[in-house]
Image: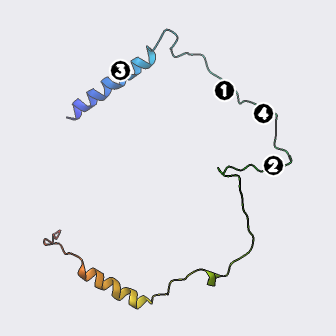
Amino acid sequence: MKKTLLVLCLLSTSAAFAQYIGGGAASYISSEPQIYQVPSHPAHAGYAPMLQEQSVLASASYSSAQGDRPASDFPQPQAVSLGAFARQVRKEHALLKKSPVVYVNQ
């Protein structure tokens, strides 16, 4: 099985390499070195005035407000004690459907 897989990989690799090399008349691997030139950008960052704001919303109306609202304006749930929460979770766990089969790995 391993030998068959190795032969299959070799054949598919050689086929892929043949497609890469024989893709056209101008596609060949050149022995000439290709020197990479980093493009130069003479422009640099500078200070400029900010543009006017543009709305990206569908409607043209825009409203804004400032200030803080106290936490008492928002409804807060009552804090549940840790013991009460543990008892509730224990009751829910006892009501869950149990599996009829128990597997033990030895």
Question: Is residue 65 toward the left or the right of residue 87 in the image?
Answer: right
Q: Residues within 10 Å of mark 3 (few under 14, many from 20)?
A: few
State which tag comes first along the sequence, 4 or 2: 4
Q: Position of residue 55 (x, y in %)?
A: 71, 50
- The residue that mark 1 highlights is 36
Residue 12 placement: quadrant: top left
Asked if the residue at tag 1 contacts the one at tag 2, i.e. Cβ–Cβ closer than 8 Å, the answer is: no
Question: Is residue 41 toward the left or the right of residue 33 in the image?
Answer: right
State which tag comes first along the sequence, 2 or 1: 1
Question: Is residue 51 toward the left or the right of residue 68 in the image?
Answer: right
- The residue that mark 3 highlights is 15
Q: Position of residue 49 (x, y in %)?
A: 86, 48
What secondary structure is found at the residue carrying circle 3? helix
Identify which amino acid the numbered label 3 is placed on: Ala
Using the image as rendered, state which of residue 93 and residue 52 is in the foreground: 52
Asked if the residue at tag 3 contacts the one at tag 1, i.e. Cβ–Cβ closer than 8 Å, the answer is: no
Q: Position of residue 105 (x, y in %)?
A: 17, 68
Identify which amino acid the numbered label 1 is placed on: Tyr
State which tag comes first along the sequence, 1 or 4: 1
State which tag comes first along the sequence, 3 or 2: 3
- The residue that mark 4 highlights is 41
Residue closest to the far top: 25
What secondary structure is found at the residue carrying circle 2? loop
Q: Position of residue 84 (x, y in %)?
A: 39, 90
Q: Nearer the viewer, mark 2 or mark 1?
A: 2
The numbered mark at residue 52 is 2
Q: Residue at x 54, y 83 (%)?
A: 76
Q: Residue at x 45, y 15 (%)?
A: 23
